[in-house]
Image: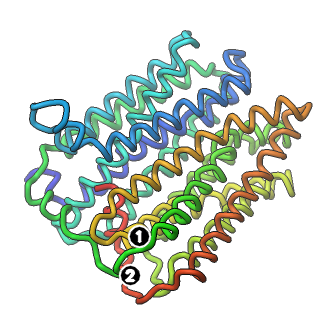
Amino acid sequence: MNPSSKPIPVALAGMVSLAVAMGIGRFAFTPLLPMMLADGVVDLPGASWLASANYFGYLLGALLCTLQPWLWRRFTTLPALDSPALVRAGLAATSLLTLGMALQSPGLWPLLRFAAGVASAVVFLYTSGWCLAQLARCDAMALGGLMYAGPGGGIVASGLLAGAMVHWHQSAAAGWLLFGVLATLLSALVWPVFARDDPAAQAVSSTAAPTAAPGGSGVEMTLLTVAYGLAGFGYIITATFLPVIARQALPGSAWLDLFWPIFGAAVVAGALLATRIRFAGDLRYLLAACYAMQSAGVAASTVRPTLAGFVAGSLLLGLPFTTITFFAMREARRLRPASPTGLMGLLTAMYGVGQIAGPPLAAMLIARSGTPARGFALSLEIAAGSLVVGALLYLELARRYPMAQTALSPPDGRAAGRGTD
């Protein structure tokens, strides 16, 4: 049998694919940044722009994926590429672009990080949509939680490897080379699973969204979009600079390179728990709680810049990371039950805008605050405050637009799939 017809290989392939796309393609930069700073190949302002280039690429990639069917029909007469082909292309690009960062060509790095962001978005969106369609065929949608543990697993692996390389006094270039080789090996491992698309799977993935509500108003969808964009801004400064911030607060600590893997482990736990939460009420209250948890995680390293504060902050930031996306996409389906894709694309775009804004803001505040520690503290306070504002927006949405009826889909991962069709 083709491995794509079996649920366990599909879920594991999805997990590995997302680990490559997110854990390496997007977030390998975070644990390697202290090494790059120590090597003198980049400074904090330059690092901020490299991070933003990657996040801008992810934003553009998400928008291109949303518009891909229209663009393909409008500008070419060739047959459209199916999802597995796009996943393979994105995995190959992620591997090559990661290897390219090992070259001593700083002028190329912004372009490489931008392109890696585009590739990460392609892999994330098409892996999610295709794998969840295959799992639906096999009546194994609960395995979707395993797939979404992939980004956290990639973060754990990249963080532990980077910590080991710091201990062995390796250069950042060696780190990029190692991660590029790892991405190549992992991509080769799952390559056979991503066979050509199956018409039966396409039929499953194109089924109509549940009609839990007749649809939301323009104001309601606008407020949801703004609130979701605040999540992108609220977490990204910590997610980009966590090892650097820890070195400012705890110089010489043996835990410096473990906070990032702890964050990744929390992401894994949150991804698995998100598909098991049974809640028949208004998801906006859960979203508000998730934002409050992340706000506490962001603030923990400034309120208590101690070992306990950084561990607690990493856990509180990571646990709701996937849950926020999972619930927000279900809200988009509830508001636009007939055609949710447009609203989901808008949510993804606004989240990307928030991510892009975070690192330059931190760089500006560092430059104006006299010391990096003060600049990071101020930027994290702003980020934590933005998450509080997002939580309040969800509470206001729940108050102003009460749900007419409660008919949410079961927590089996099916809702997440609509966000990536």
Quick check: 157 left or right of 298? left
Q: Quadrant of the C terminus?
A: bottom left
Q: Which residue is mark 1?
A: 330
Question: How far apart are labels 1 and 2 at the CA level?
Answer: 8 Å
Q: Residue 345 or 18: which is nearer the viewer?
A: 345
The residue pinned by badge 2 equals 408
Point out residue 417 in the picture as x, y percentages from the top left corner: 32, 62
Examine the rendered structure and indicate whether residue 23 appears above or below residue 267: above
Q: Vertical placement of 318 versus 376: above or below?
A: below
Given residues 287 and 309, the one toward you in this image is 287
- Residue 311 shows up from this direction: no
Q: What's the residue type where badge 1 is placed?
A: Arg
Q: Residue furthest right?
A: 370
Q: Amino acid at mark 2?
A: Leu
The image position of residue 187, as x and y in percent, is: 32, 36
Give the mark, 1 or 2, whose residue is nearer the N terminus.
Answer: 1
Residue 153 % position (x, y): 48, 50
In the rendered view, does 21 fall on the left or right side of 79?
right
**Residue at the location (63% across, 21% down)?**
170
Residue 188 in percent (x, y) is at 28, 34
1 and 2 marks in contact (CB < 8 Å): yes
Q: Quadrant of residue 38?
A: top right
